[in-house]
Amino acid sequence: MLQTLFSHTLGKGILVRLQECNADDDLRMDFDVPRGIVGCSFCLEGAMHTRIREPHLHADVSSGISGIWFVPGARLSAVIPSGRTRWLDLFIPYERFLGVIEDNIHEICPELLSSLKRNSAAVPFRRTAGMDANTRLTIEQMLACPFEGALKRLFLESKSLDLLLGEICRHALIRRTPGCPCCSNRAKVEKAKALLLENLTDPLTIAELAGQVGMSESSLKRAFRDVQGISIFAFFQAHRLEQARALLARGEMNVTEVAFCVGYSNHSHFSRAFKRQFGVSPKRCLARTWPVSALPASMTETGTNLA
């Protein structure tokens, strides 16, 4: 069964909508995409396969994937496998989107610009990739919005614009050339990520990471942010707090044991960090009174060697 969990129309016609599908069998949907909409989609759980009949564009989207698209008037088919699938859509009016990018038009990739012309030769535009930690954090904050009424609308609008900016930067800007420092250091950044995740309870310092991947501390910090869109510290925090939430959801350990397992020696520090990040205490998550959405996110906390 397909259901809309929330739908909010925000400033200047922006629409944000959270949907969920729970089905015993695969669900197939066919619909025409409105002509005046640029969209961003974020798969939070499950998977789906989409197909644009003309010019036969296919995409498989799974949990943790997001993207930006402009497919005016296209006939789109979507197949959602059995089980639970959740996704967030952001719809931006065509004219509003043009206003957002007009001062940076020279930085927008030619494929999107060509599609935005909406002439007979225009090809639908769609790009997807894995969500970064900043995107996940923003979505977490939207789903746990603490406000009502006008403040809620303002909060959701600001977060929606954050999501839009992130998707434009990741998918719509002209790609960097293969010789740029970001690309040449990507392998070293991936190695640093792997080293961080090998042991969340006793992480390497920035100096140790830099030494093991053959970079200076400042170069590693800069390259990591260029490649990942987030600092080393925020990346580390995202993963260990997500691991903590998964452990709490299992109900096999108490809060103190989970805190220790993910590298917090101080129970109070862990509880404050968890609540700042997810909006609820670890104890409440342990009691399963709050749904686990399996989305990691980033935050800050003092007192670790990754500052």
Image (cartoon, helix red, strand yellow):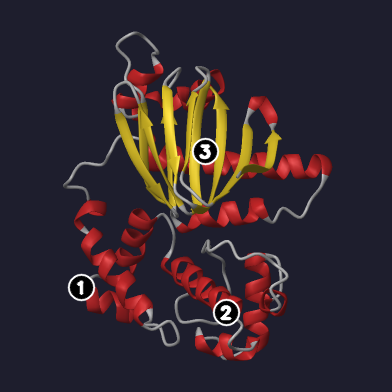
The 10 Å Cα crowd at callout 3, few under 14, some 14 to 19, many 20 or more, is many
Quick check: 149 left or right of 2?
A: right
Location of mark 2 (residue) = 250
Depth check, mark 1 against mark 2: the one in front is 2
In the rendered image, residue 295, in percent from the top left (x then y), is placed at 53, 61
Amino acid marked by disc 2? Arg
Of marks 2 and 3, the one in the foreground: 2
Q: Which residue is mark 1?
A: 214
**CA–CA distance between discs 1 and 3?**
35 Å
Tag 3: residue type?
Leu
Choose top left, top right, bottom left or bottom right for residue 219. bottom left
Q: Which-is-in-front pick, marks 1 and 3? A: 3
Q: CA distance from mark 1 to mark 2?
A: 39 Å
Question: What residue is disc 3 on?
Answer: 164
Image quadrant containing the N terminus: top right
> Label 2 vs label 3: CA separation?
34 Å
